[in-house]
């Protein structure tokens, strides 16, 4: 007998629009009308309902969504079968073999003796609940093969760096991932203005917040694992842009072609290509249909080349992206070389895919101006051979033949390759090359956005990147950019992949032929609570596509997307609970037809990581350490899903190294030391080797060298130059994010050697207030410290009243923030300040070396070896965790560091320390320990006066030792893109008569620096040296400091 519920439950925990505010009205328990059914059936309904209520009220044996209900119960008495069909909310939880077994056990117990001999099946979403267990958690015999990727012919990846020192073998090599962060600045036709898609709250906006996870952390982690990452929004934060193109050469740019003979000349391709044309672009203009491209046949050696030489408008980092035509007859290893400030970097690009759009090669440093020999991109027509090629995934010439991925290659027949070229089987294509991200160039309502392209919604970048309008970015074919933006992203994925996975309007369109493996939409939500819990993490997938089927075009089950969402949510919640919040909220796993979840024809998930409207969630979201760890969790989840989906063993890339030091072992030879960092959350993430990258003076880092131990001796030091180093840890899964940067220099006729100790490790969100109804971030007290840079800060929070209600996105109530900094990049802790201090020391004729404070604390580096020590404190200070029951971090004066400093000054060392919280981190506490006051007074020879000694950065010399060199200078106190702001400098005073004030803040006349002469010589600044504005002023101040030690 089939018994169906007479009404449809349409109850929501949250509004069904992604990232919209939640609905928290308590719902009454719904009663079932089962009086007309026989007693056996009534018993079954009551038993199952009792089980559900038990789960809801006591989370036993599992916690379920409180809107879970019975949909249908089918009882076949003759066959002794019971099918229990539950409503969708029952599917929101994760299913595991143990939980499924417990569910069946408890349901059978509630059904009792009447059903003791019945086969019981519990179903939801049309599936037995055991089918909702992800493959990764199943026994091998129980794996659902319909959710696994189909075996396909090998394709070389879109882009491979040829001269990389390492290629992963158990990571994401050869994988292509579509990834996008949230919304973006868009044109609202109803209001006839450009605006954000979400409200400005808690110093950011959701249109930028996920970008601050993706660009600095998640995207590099995926690329470090070997993946090609594609984004429908601009990834380059550089607002400058130079496009060099064969169709539009101008006075400031240059496109050149070269051919050795007329046998293999460049020629115009038969199809259209990019041309900048007339900007801004109106309507649905496609710049990739307004120009031409060029082609030339490949040859066994480079007999033809094209060069793109930019006129760079200002020094900085620029992404280089290329355009070309794709065809089956084109090379799968087109040879590009980028010449930049760090040397040159080579790539192989598969030109059988990805044509007529922008393909990113990487980010590089360039100097301002036109430098034809050292700043350019060159495409050559040579067929890549093993003699000049590290392992890359290309079928033109080589295959990987290595268990670890370093340098063993297997070469195809050179004769075959040459013949393929000469009979016309392979061509290379040249079109435009772009340097930088630029400003928006799409006109809507008669105006462009007026903002950097990275802030704009995906709809506009897609048009600029050559996507077809009605198939991808203008799917409504109306003037509704809001809808087009979120609908376009899934169709962009489908167009990247192409037939038979093409866009919904035409599955058979050829598209770009890029074999996208996975899609992720990264958002934050808008729920809020007033208790001590987070809104937490929600994941959304769709078990049906736009064609209403439950299979992708290759007949892989769309429940593969559920596997991915479950793995992703599990990884995130487990890691966050381990490191930050033991009660982080795990929300549901929703099967919904959200556009970003159901449109992609590949496994896809929509992530709502946390709530940007909830204060506690935002205390985590604005912490750069949390962003790093959450991004690492997402990367790990992608890796683990693709591992089971595609059938390979995975290794997680290591964490960055620490305890870094760079010291001379004699006058010209340097030894670098570091230590690997184990990941307690991931046993495979152990370092097996390392890559050391080198920068000379103010250039860029080179492509690195592989090291198999935790140290490296370098014998190539030239006097007068500054050498800087960073290290990554490597294993079969990829390479870690980089270490801090240390610098050294050997001076001719050196005046002495200075050890620079980098003790500035802190990255943090702004200070917070939590007093009654006052909840929020208070920049006035502490603006926090970005990790290298911040792209999502929009301005100070001005609405701290937690009772203030949302009225409109322009009046969002609690959390409302100013907009005066949005679109600006804010400088933070670059982890490169030994270079700043060292440059002044080098200019004064001193040799210098550097190390991390961990190296000092662990006695890896002995301060006593050096006559002069320069401690960089920056904005280091003890910082509370987001939850009061979690430990604080970044304390400056650890017991180990105090001991090292005490020993150093007691033995007559010359000590220079600068930092904003040099005194306040010791003294400004609810209860000041006697040992802290004694250490400040007796060891460092100062007493603390105030933490807010000045708002402006003017400093005056008040001691002849300083005044004779520089009477006045300034340090930075304002947010900008060049150097972090020292917004709360310390006021410090001499502790005894042997010390004296040597600098005062101009505005307040409070003591800014203390000098001490005695058994040891000490100079202490209450502000960071590296924030002093101007190289000449820094040099003069450093000269005065070193003169104090004479």
Image: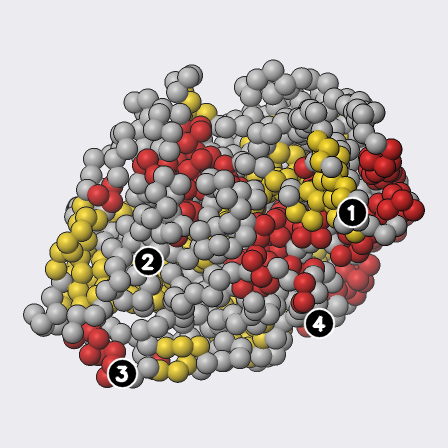
For marks 3 and 4, give the CA distance: 52 Å
Q: CA distance from mark 4 to mark 1?
A: 78 Å
Residue occupied by mark 1: 78
Label 2 vs 1, first from the N-terminus: 1
Residue holding disc 4: 860
Q: Is residue 121 above or below residue 166?
A: above
Q: Earlier in the sequence, mark 3 or mark 4?
A: 3
* Disc 2 + disc 1, Cβ < 8 Å: no
Could you classify mark 1 by the number of other residues whose Cα lies within 10 Å: few (under 14), some (14-19), or many (20 or more)?
few
Dot placed on the residue nearer the N-terminal end, 3 or 2: 2
Tag of residue 414: 3
C-alpha separation, residue under disc 3 versus residue under disc 2: 24 Å
Mark 2–mark 4 Cα distance, whole angstroms, equals 51 Å
Tell which tag, 2 or 4, sits nearer the viewer.
2
Is residue 360 visible in the rendered image? The answer is: no
Q: Which residue is mark 2?
A: 353
Residue 200: image x %, image y %? Answer: 56, 27
């Amino acid at each position: 007998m089939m018994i169906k519920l007479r009404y449809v439950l349409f109850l929501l925990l949250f509004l069904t629009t992604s990232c919209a505010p939640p609905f928290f009205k308590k719902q009454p328990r719904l009663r079932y009308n089962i009086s007309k059914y026989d007693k056996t059936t009534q018993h079954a309904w009551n038993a199952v309902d009792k089980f559900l209520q038990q789960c809801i009220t006591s989370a036993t044996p599992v916690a379920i969504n409180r809107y879970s209900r019975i949909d249908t119960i089918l009882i076949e008495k003759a066959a002794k079968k019971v099918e229990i069909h539950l409503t969708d909310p029952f599917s929101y939880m994760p299913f595991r073999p143990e939980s499924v077994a417990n569910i069946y056990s408890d349901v059978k117990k509630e059904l009792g003796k009447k059903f003791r001999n019945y086969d019981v099946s519990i179903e939801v979403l049309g599936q037995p609940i055991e089918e909702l267990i992800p493959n990764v958690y199943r026994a091998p015999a129980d794996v659902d093969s319909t959710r696994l990727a189909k075996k396909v012919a090998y394709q070389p990846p879109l882009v491979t760096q040829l001269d990389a020192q390492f290629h992963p073998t158990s990571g994401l090599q050869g994988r292509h991932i579509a990834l996008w962060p949230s919304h973006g600045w868009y044109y609202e036709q109803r209001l006839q203005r450009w605006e954000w898609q979400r409200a400005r709250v808690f110093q950011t906006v959701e249109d930028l917040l996920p970008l601050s996870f993706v660009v600095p952390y998640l995207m590099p982690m995926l690329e470090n694992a070997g993946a090609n990452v594609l984004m429908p929004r601009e990834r380059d934060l550089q607002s400058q842009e130079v496009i060099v193109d064969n169709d539009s050469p101008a006075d400031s740019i240059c496109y050149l072609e070269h051919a050795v003979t007329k046998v293999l000349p460049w020629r115009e391709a038969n199809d259209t290509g990019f041309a900048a044309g007339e900007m801004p672009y109106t309507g649905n203009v496609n710049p990739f249909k307004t120009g031409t491209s060029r082609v030339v046949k490949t040859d066994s050696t480079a007999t033809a080349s094209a060069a793109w030489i930019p006129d760079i408008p200002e020094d900085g980092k620029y992404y280089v992206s290329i355009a070309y035509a794709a065809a089956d007859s084109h090379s799968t290893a087109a040879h590009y070389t980028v010449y930049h400030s760090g040397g040159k970097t080579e790539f192989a690009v598969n030109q059988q895919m990805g044509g007529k759009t922008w393909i990113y090669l990487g980010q590089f440093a360039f100097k301002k101006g036109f430098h034809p020999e050292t700043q350019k991109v060159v495409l050559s027509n040579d067929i890549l051979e093993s003699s000049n090629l590290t392992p890359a995934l290309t079928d033109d010439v080589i295959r990987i033949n290595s268990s670890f991925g370093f340098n063993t290659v297997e070469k195809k027949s050179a004769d075959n390759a040459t013949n393929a070229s000469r009979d016309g089987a392979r061509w290379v294509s040249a079109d435009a090359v772009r340097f930088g991200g630029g400003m928006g160039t799409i006109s809507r309502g008669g105006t462009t956005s007026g903002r950097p392209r990275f802030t704009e919604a995906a709809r506009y970048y897609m048009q600029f990147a050559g996507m077809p309008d009605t198939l991808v970015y203008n799917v409504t074919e109306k003037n509704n950019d809001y809808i087009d933006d979120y609908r376009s992203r899934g169709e962009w994925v489908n167009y990247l992949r192409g037939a038979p996975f093409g866009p919904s309007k035409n599955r058979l369109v050829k598209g770009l032929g890029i074999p996208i493996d996975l899609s992720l939409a990264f958002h934050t939500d808008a729920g809020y609570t007033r208790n001590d819990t987070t809104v937490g993490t929600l994941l959304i997938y769709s078990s049906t596509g736009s064609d209403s089927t439950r299979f992708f075009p290759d007949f892989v089950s769309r429940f593969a997307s559920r596997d991915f969402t479950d793995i992703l949510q599990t990884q995130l919640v487990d890691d966050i609970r381990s490191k930050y919040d033991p009660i982080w909220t795990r929300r549901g796993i929703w099967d919904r037809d959200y556009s970003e979840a159901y449109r992609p024809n590949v496994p896809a998930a929509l992530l709502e990581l946390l709530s940007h409207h909830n204060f506690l969630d935002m205390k985590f979201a604005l912490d750069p350490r949390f962003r790093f760890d959450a991004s690492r969790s997402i990367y790990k989840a992608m890796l683990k899903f693709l591992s089971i989906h595609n059938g390979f063993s995975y290794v997680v890339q290591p964490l960055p190294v620490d305890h870094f030091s760079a010291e001379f072992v004699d006058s010209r030879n340097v030894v670098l030391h570091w230590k690997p960092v184990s990941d307690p959350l991931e046993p495979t993430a152990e370092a097996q080797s390392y890559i050391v990258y080198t920068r000379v003076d103010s250039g860029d880092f080179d492509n690195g060298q592989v090291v198999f131990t935790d140290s490296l001796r370098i014998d190539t030091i030239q006097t007068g130059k500054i050498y800087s180093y960073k290290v990554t840890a490597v294993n079969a899964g990829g390479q870690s994010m980089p270490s801090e940067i240390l610098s050294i220099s050997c001076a001719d006729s050196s005046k002495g050697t200075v050890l620079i100790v980098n003790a500035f490790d802190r990255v943090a969100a702004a200070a917070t207030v939590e007093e009654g109804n006052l909840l929020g971030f208070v920049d006035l007290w502490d603006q926090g410290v970005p990790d290298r840079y911040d792209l999502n800060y929009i301005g100070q929070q001005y609405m701290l009243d937690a009772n203030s209600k949302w009225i409109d996105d322009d009046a969002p109530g609690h959390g409302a923030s100013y907009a005066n900094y949005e679109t600006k990049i804010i400088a933070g802790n670059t982890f490169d300040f030994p270079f700043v201090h060292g440059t002044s020391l080098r200019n004064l004729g001193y040799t210098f070396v550097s190390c991390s404070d961990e190296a000092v604390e662990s006695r890896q580096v002995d301060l006593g070896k050096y006559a002069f020590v320069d401690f960089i404190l920056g904005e280091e200070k003890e910082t509370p965790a987001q939850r009061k029951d979690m430990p604080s971090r970044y304390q400056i004066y650890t017991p180990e560091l105090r001991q090292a400093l005490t020993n150093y000054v007691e033995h007559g060392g010359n000590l220079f320390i600068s930092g904003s919280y040099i005194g306040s981190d010791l003294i400004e506490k609810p209860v000041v320990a006697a040992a802290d006051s004694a250490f400040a007074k007796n060891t460092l020879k100062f007493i603390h006066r105030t933490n807010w000694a000045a708002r402006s950065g003017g400093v005056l010399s008040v001691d002849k030792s300083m005044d004779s060199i520089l009477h006045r200078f300034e340090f930075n106190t304002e947010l900008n893109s060049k150097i972090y702001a020292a917004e709360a400098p310390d006021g410090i005073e001499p502790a005894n008569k042997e010390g004296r004030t040597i600098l005062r803040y101009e505005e307040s006349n409070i003591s800014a620096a203390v000098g001490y002469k005695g058994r040891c010589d000490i100079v202490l600044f209450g502000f960071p040296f590296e924030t002093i504005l101007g190289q000449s002023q820094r040099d003069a101040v450093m000269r005065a400091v070193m003169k104090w030690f004479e």
